[in-house]
Amino acid sequence: MSDYKYMCGFGSHFSSEDPRCPNALPVGQNTPQKCAYGLYAEQLSGTAFTAPRKENARTWLYRINPSAKHQPFQSYEKEGGKYLTHNWDEQKPNPNQMRWKPFDMPAPSEKVNFAQGLHTVCGAGDARCRHGLAVHVFMCNVSMKDCAFYNSDGDFLIVPQEGVLDITTEFGKMKVAPNEICVIPQGVRYSVNVAGPTRGYILEVYDNHFHLPDLGPIGANGLANPRDFETPVAWFENREVKDFAVISKYQGHLFVAKQNHSCFDVVAWHGNYVPYKYDLAKFNVINSVSFDHCDPSIFTVLTCPSSRYGTAIADFVIFPPRWSVQERTFRPPYYHRNCMSEFMGLILGRYEAKEEGFMPGGATLHSMMTPHGPDAKCFEGASNAKLVPERVAEGTQAFMFESSLSMAVTKWGEETCQKLDAKYYECWQMLKNNFKLQ
Ligand SMILES: O=C(O)Cc1cc(O)ccc1O
Ligand SMILES: [Fe+2]
């Protein structure tokens, strides 16, 4: 990964020039009468012009061709996006605990790229009203060639599970491997190269961008530290292409516009509206060192806040390897009913609350107020375990997208994918009534 260069920081105001074009960025202004090297200046706005300064996000791009130079958009739904949807009324509501076996990779005879391999599992809300979220999975096996994708509806937080994503963005190049994540904000164009069968999860949010959670009494440091977020440096190609395809997800549908040039022609840029990646191994894990199981919010990496203080549209939470030391405590996750929806995925290893059945590349959904918690085997084991300091979740990484919205499962998620495990409920049936009057 050493041939990729990044700048460190979260929410920083960065400046970057491709080294082939020194002084491409204008000095002391954004829109000179003529830009250096004959470039076009283009602003990419990620918040309303008038958003408060602490939230205001925009970037100035200095590019060879303005993005506006393209043919009209046409439907892309024959080529891809068949299972991408924002229609949350496809199915009757289903409050059951849900568990999916690992989602299938495309058959080797099929050629599916990242944009074509997007499948929506569940979600809520409306991209048109800028409120809600969607959970997608992607399964692909070929690179995007002479094409780019962007999302007009919101930000993508991408969690690769198998295979490395080699991503060219308008801002530069980044490589994102399993156990790393990246965020591609609304509107940013990118193309994904893969080396073989590749799978992962996506949290899409419409309301807001991702923020680092407040740390409260934890103090000024901890959890995901800002300096560990990495943004690519400027890189461009000046390439004429007969039919370069720019694919947009717009109001939940895919469209394509052809143009005669690569869109990766940004020579220099400056601003704070940027794509970034983060290595989950860098997460500073904080937890109880006395007794009891802390709420999983202690493991929040990023949050997309709603307008209700402390209540997220979606939190991205991980369950990383760590020491478990609590005394007189049932250490695994507790039994739980939640006013939030919990979608979980597994990047590698095994999740601590489930002995079997929840596999890397699979998922679970515990909807609003749907009871869940450790399976019978886990309960037995943890209730009787000797409470010595112990490494837990070694070599594993589970995560949760937790939302204050009540998500609906798509037809693909509930039926077409054929991965839903009808026997999931059984994992709690062997829990015994241990009640004894004393
Ligand atoms: O497995 C889950 O359901 C997620 C979860 C984890 C945890 O440590 C505490 C509560 C919780 O909902
Ligand atoms: Fe839970």
Image: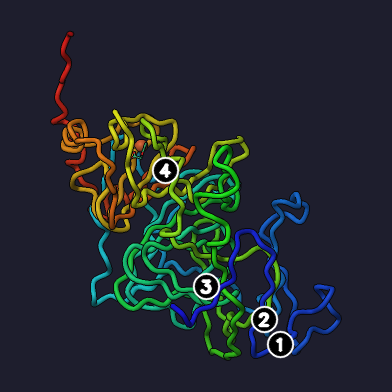
Element type at mark 3: strand
Residue 274 visible in rendering: yes
Render colour scheme: rainbow
**Image marks 4 and 2: residues in contact by CB distance under 8 Å:** no
Amino acid type for the residue under numbered disc 3: Tyr
Element type at mark 4: loop
**Image marks 2 and 1: residues in contact by CB distance under 8 Å:** yes
Q: Earlier in the sequence, mark 4 or mark 2?
A: 2
On the image, the x and y values in percent for residue 97 come to 28, 37
On the image, the x and y values in percent for residue 300 come to 47, 46
Alpha carbons under labels 1 and 4: distance apart: 53 Å
Residue 78 visible in rendering: no
Q: Is residue 347 above or below residue 98?
A: below
Question: What residue lies at 42% left-to-right and 47% top-to-bottom?
Answer: 401
Q: Which mark is residue 89?
A: 4
On the image, the x and y values in percent for residue 406 come to 44, 37
Q: Which mark is residue 190?
A: 3
Q: Is residue 52 left or right of residue 317?
A: right
**Image marks 4 and 3: residues in contact by CB distance under 8 Å:** no
Q: Is residue 11 left or right of residue 373?
A: right
For discs 4 and 2, the disc positioned in front in the rendered view: 2
Alpha carbons under labels 4 and 2: distance apart: 46 Å
Q: Report which residue position mark 1 lands on.
A: 22
State which image quarter holds ligand 1.
top left
Alpha-carbon neighbours of circle 2 within 10 Å: few (<14), some, or many (≥20)?
Answer: many
